[in-house]
Amino acid sequence: MNKPSRILTFKCKKCSKSVQVFLQKVSACTHIQPYQGICTCGEVMKHATGNKDAVESFLSSDSVTWSHHH
C-alpha cells in the first residue's frame, strides 16, 4: 500500500497564491487522508482523499479538531 503524500500544493481560491496543505493525521485508517493549510492571506484550505462520506464530512466541517469515527 502506498503512503499518502504528506504535503500537497494548491492555489488559493481567494488570492490565487500557492498554499501548502499538510496531512493532518497519519493512521491505519484508509477511509480518509485529510489535509489542511492556511494561505498567507488567511484563507483556510482543506483537501481530502478517501471515502466519499468521510471526505464530505471533513470538507464541510469548520472544526480543526474534526476526526473520523468508525
Image (cartoon, rainbow, N blue to C red):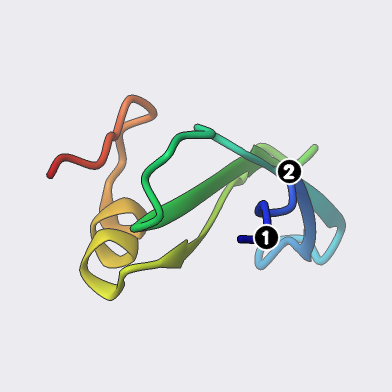
Nearest the camera: 58 or 70?
A: 70
Q: Secondary structure at mark 1?
A: loop
Return the x and y of residue 24 as percentages of the image width and height.
54, 34
Residue closer to the observer: 49 or 44: 49
Residue reaching furthest to the front = 1
The residue identified by callout 1 is: 2
Residue 49 drawn at (x, y percent):
49, 66
Q: Residue furthest right?
A: 18
Taking the view exactly as shown, the residue that stands out farthest to the bottom is: 52
Q: Quadrant of the N terminus?
A: bottom right
The number of numbered badges drawn on the structure is: 2
**As drawn, 50 above or below 64:** below
Residue 65 in picture, x, y percent from top left: 33, 25
Return the mark for residue 6: 2
The residue that appears at 32% across and 52% down in the rendered structure is 58
Quadrant of residue 68 within the rendered picture: top left
In the rendered structure, which amino acid carries the disc numbered 1? Asn
Q: Is residue 37 left or right of residue 7?
A: left
> Is 68 displayed left or right of 19 in the figure?
left
State the image coordinates of residue 34 (x, y, percent, origin top left): 48, 48
**Residue found 29% across the figure and 74% down from its top:** 52
Kind of residue indicated by mark 2: Arg
- Residue at point 27%, 47% (across, down): 61
